[in-house]
Image (cartoon, grey):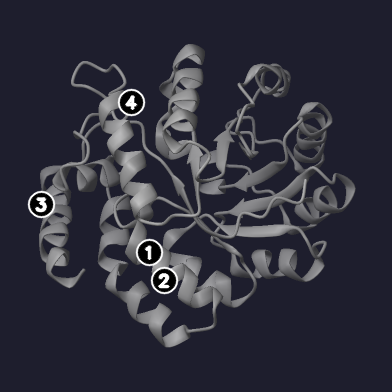
Amino acid sequence: MNKEFKGTGVAIVTPFHKYGTIDFTSLGELVDHLLSGGVDYIVALGTTSEAATLSDDEKVAVVEFIVDRVEGKLPIVVGIGGNNTSAIEAELKKIPYQNVDAILSVAPYYNKPNQKGLFYHYKALASVSDLPIILYNVPGRTCSNLSADTTVRLAHEFPNIIGIKEASGDLVQIMKIMRDKPSDFQVISGDDALTYSLIGVGAIGVISVTANAYPKVYGAMVNAALQGKWAEARALHFSLIEFMEAIFEDGNPAGIKSALSSMGIIKHHLRLPMVKVNVQTANRIKQFVDDFKSLI
């Protein structure tokens, strides 16, 4: 259970064909893009993958495809979460575990459980998972914030809960986790624009959306920060601020899919209820992509 997820992980998108089926050819090209870009691990079936719209069979197919394409070159994390604890327990028992290194499990959404409910939810998952679990706190999507106290309690009581992807944007809360967590509990940024700052207070890296498009540049920023090369990291961080703002302007993963489409890696198709970014946002993203070519 001591697997470390340091550096740049990528919450990989799921490319689709025009009529909604999974575009495995483009998914393969995207995986190759990430491998050549030097990322440290891949997260399949995260929020960015539109996992909520994938069938159980499609989820298994996506995981198996990524595992086969990666060929053991990188660790793979699989997103398994939701707001029905017993259903997630069942899903944890049937996911193809071969060559999967950890589970990323988002806090329950819509139900809005209190801290006791969140604790017992994750306790139930920890009791059935054969793989280490990374908590995922993203209250902007779930409407339930996993507090620092609850996170630290889970970290101390369950050795297979090994870390948290923190996307609350609450720097005080994240610093309290840093202060009180077990020494080997991993705090991972879940907010691309805050990763530079979070590494400064002890985060070990990021699970990134931006790195789908710019794995080398974003990964170089993360590595420089982890090595204490703050001026270098800051310059790389600043170079991507406009991009990070633009890709989240009109919904995730619509923005990053627009960027990847502009780069010729995938086509800009999503499944309802997600739709393409508006024309103004698409133009802003394309302009950045075109201009940034001369800088990398």
Tag on residue 283? 3
Amino acid carrying mark 1 in the image: Tyr
- For residue 7, say whether it is visible: yes
Decide which of 125, 183 is in the foreground and name it.
183
Q: With 255 as the anchor, is 194 left or right in this view?
A: right
Q: Decide: is 45 above or below 244.
A: above
Q: Considering the numbered disc 2 on the image, is that residue within a helix, a strand or a loop?
A: helix
Q: Locate residue 214, reporting x and y percent.
A: 30, 57
- Which of the two marks, 4 or 1, is nearer to us in this view? 1
Q: Earlier in the sequence, mark 4 or mark 1?
A: 1
Q: Residues within 10 Å of mark 2 (few under 14, many from 20)?
A: many
Residue behind mark 4: 273
Amino acid carrying mark 3 in the image: Asn
- Which of the two marks, 4 or 2, is nearer to us in this view? 2
Gap between marks 4 and 2, in whole Å? 33 Å
Q: Locate residue 248, reporting x and y percent.
A: 32, 51
Gap between marks 4 and 3, in whole Å? 22 Å
Residue behind mark 1: 218
Residue found farthest to the bottom = 231
- Assign the N terminus to one quadrant of the image: top right
Residue behind mark 2: 221
Q: How crowded is mark 3: few (under 14 residues within 10 Å), some or many (20 or more)?
A: some
Gap between marks 4 and 1, in whole Å? 29 Å
Q: Do the residues labelled 4 and 2 touch (CB within 8 Å)?
A: no
Amino acid carrying mark 2 in the image: Met
Gap between marks 1 and 3, in whole Å? 22 Å
